[in-house]
Amino acid sequence: MDRKTVGVIGGGIMGVDIARRLCREGFEVSLMEGSPEIGGLASPSKFGDYTWDKFYHVILPDDLFTLNMIKELGLENEIKWNETKTGFFINDKYHSMSDVIEFLRFPALNLIDKFRLGLTILAGSYIKDYERLETIPVTVWLKRWSGKNTFNRIWLPLLKAKLGDDYKLTSAAFICATIKRLYGARKKGAKKEVFGFVRGGYARILAAMKEKIKSEDINTITNFKVVSVSQTPQHDLIVKSVDNKEMVFNYVITSLPSFVTASVCHDLTDIEREKLKNIKYLGVICISLLLNKKLTPYYVTNITDERIPLTGVIEMTALVGTSFFGGNSLVYLPKYVNSEDQMFNLSDQDLKESFIASLKLIHPSLKDDEIISCQVAKAKYVITLPEMGYSSNLPSFKTSVDNLFVINSSFITDGTLNVNETLKVADTYFPKVLKIIKNEE
């Protein structure tokens, strides 16, 4: 009896995980990726003579899905955990907020404001009813817990830095998911924040993943940019690429962003297509600098100065050390913007000049000859905007097209986008798809 064929569209971590799960269930699997390599947002990049993640990634102690994946790939002993520090740039000065003492000394807030901020963080880290949070605007929730002063001095600048004007559309689920994620670095009684990484970054993880895929006989097709998915009279699905290559499958699972799925799956109903298109995405433009000096002791520097158009400053070598980079320091400058923002139309050179100029506002001593390498990374569809009533407006993973399913990051409703959450989505929805495919429903 011939094995059923399944096409998985999208070779990010989620797509790879789904493909491997299907293979273990006995299906003949093809993984289609539009880029030259699998990995998606976890893909590596060259920084001068060195390789690390194109976008910044860390592992938290309670990232169980990520840790299980790493263990299954045989890299468990390659994980390294380090304490990190968090900084704030406020009133033209740096302030550390990495432990209780520093929190109490934080000069931007009075004692009552600090107490309320602490309560906000505790409340956000333990709340589990995210559907109820989706009925509350993020501004209302934060003012209620933290008060107006803390909201205006801390939360509002951070919301604008992360979401731009879209913060006005966002529910309280966003901030609680963010708090829960960061609070996870202090789980199990830790007094310090602790993050982890695999030696060599995600390049090492993806190399091990490729070996697994090869050994499992998954047909991996890169440079396959999907332009259409259509159904045959026999209810099979034809997947066509931009260069007119076609593949036919019994089933197709797409992990592409919702907007892209709506544009390529032509047999969806108008209602389905509209629901997919209505899911708003934020993209990211990230400038990565390899510097011959350290900037700060902070892994993350939160910026509360609206003159500086950066979401934050991520000094990766404050976590991983400088030995992977010949003693140099790797710094990420991310800026999250609406997926239709005109910034995506700027040249790489214009973006480099703009972001470096912004960095010099908070590091005026930085000189151009101290920059060894400068790279630009862009992604238009990265995180979904958790608007009011987000969950109730999501389309179903099972489409109206027979044998066509959607499993993507838009189904993250109680977390922020990261590798662990994408694996969690796959773990949640794959069994539901499998049940339908095997006619066990």
Image (cartoon, rainbow, N blue to C red):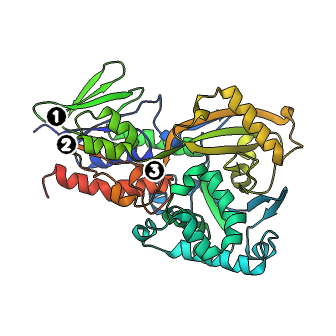
Of labels 2 and 3, earlier in sequence is 3
The disc labelled 1 sits on which kind of residue?
Asp
Sooner in the amino-acid sequence: mark 1 or mark 2:
1
Residue 96 shown left or right of residue 187 in the figure: right
Instruction: Assess disc 2: are there few (<14), some (14-19) or many (≥20) residues with their C-alpha within 10 Å of its C-alpha.
Output: many
Q: Which of the two marks, 1 or 3, is nearer to us in this view?
A: 1
Q: Which residue is mark 3?
A: 73
What secondary structure is found at the residue carrying circle 1?
Answer: loop
The mark closer to the camera, 2 or 3, is 2
Q: Which mark is residue 34?
A: none
Work out whether 247 lies above or below 108: above
- CB atoms of marks 1 and 2 within 8 Å: yes
Looking at the image, is mark 1 or mark 3 earlier in the sequence? 3
Residue drawn at x 52%, y 42% is: 41
Which of the 4 image quadrants contains residue 94? bottom right
Q: Secondary structure at mark 3?
A: loop
Residue type at mark 3: give it. Answer: Leu
Q: Residue reaching furthest top?
A: 243
At 64% from the left edge and 33% from the top edge, which residue is drawn?
376
Whether residue 49 is visible: no
Residue annotated with mark 1 = 236
Residue 380 lies, in percent from the top left, at: 51, 38
**Helix, strand or loop at disc 2?**
loop
Please state which amino acid type lies under the numbered disc 2: Asn
**Alpha carbon of mark 1 to alpha carbon of mark 2: how far?**
8 Å
Residue 149 in which image quadrant: bottom right
The residue lying at 48 percent from left, 61 percent from top is: 415
Q: Count neighbours of disc 1 (C-alpha within 10 A) and say few if under 14, some if 14 to 19, many if 20 or more.
A: some
In this view, the residue in front, 425 or 438, is 425
Name the mark on residue 403: 2
* The N terminus sits in image quarter: top left
| Residue 273 visible in image | yes
